[in-house]
Image (cartoon, grey):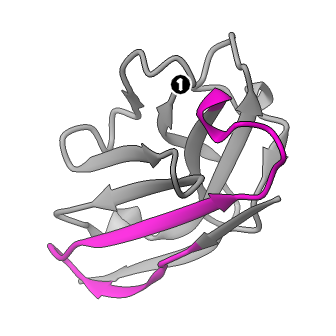
């Protein structure tokens, strides 16, 4: 399972950190982890991903330079640090994972485990 936390209501320009814990018998470090977000009526949007190979990180164009993804293997947790938040960042944020992923981490279809999500609302 995946369980997200950390969402909430913040003001324009503020920061927020989301957490996602993985419950699995497999080694967390062997999972690719990602964050997506979705606004009602729109498709789910790629936000950030951290491959299991620790070979860099990937970001969506709209968040690059403001958001940072990181993994804590000792806690089986992935974080999404969000800074300089904007009202357009308002969305339901989902954590996703795939064991030993070797595909395109920006695609929803690459992931086989999803959390229920956590709501982030940025007021103007």
Q: Nearer the viewer, residue 75 or 91?
A: 75
Does residue 84 appear to the left or right of 54 in the view shown?
Answer: left
Identify the residue at image location x=78%, y=52%: 114
* Count of labels in the image: 1
At a point 38% along the width and 45% down the height, the residue shown is 69
x, y percentage for residue 51? Answer: 53, 24
User: Residue 65 lies in what quarter of the image?
Assistant: top left
Q: Position of residue 98 (x, y in %)?
A: 75, 32
Q: Position of residue 3 (x, y in %)?
A: 70, 68
Query: Can you tell which quarter of the image residue 85 is in?
Result: bottom left
**Residue 43 at least partly seen:** no
**Mark 1 element type:** loop
- Residue located beneath label 1 in the image: 51
Residue at image point 80% right, 38% down? 26
Indicate left or right for 58 with 49 as reference: left
- Look at 82% across and 45% down and name the residue there: 113
Residue 114 shown in magenta? no
On screen, residue 23 versus residue 123, left or right, reads right
Q: Is residue 83 visible?
A: yes
Task: Give the camera-side residue of 88 and 121.
Answer: 121
Over which residues does the magenta segment extend?
5-31
Q: Quadrant of the C terminus?
A: bottom left
- In which image quadrant can residue 75 be found? bottom right
């Amino acid at each position: 399972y995946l369980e997200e936390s950390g969402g909430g209501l913040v003001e324009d320009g503020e920061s927020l950190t989301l957490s996602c814990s993985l419950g699995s018998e497999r080694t967390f470090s062997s999972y690719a982890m990602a964050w997506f977000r979705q606004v009602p009526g729109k498709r789910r949007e790629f936000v950030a991903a951290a491959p299991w190979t620790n070979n860099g990180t990937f970001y969506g164009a709209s968040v690059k330079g403001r958001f940072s993804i990181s993994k804590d293997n000792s806690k089986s947790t992935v974080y999404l640090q969000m800074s300089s938040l904007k009202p357009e960042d308002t969305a339901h944020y989902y954590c996703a994972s795939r064991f030993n992923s070797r595909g395109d981490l920006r695609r929803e279809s690459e992931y086989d485990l999803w959390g229920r999500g956590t709501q982030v609302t940025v007021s103007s």
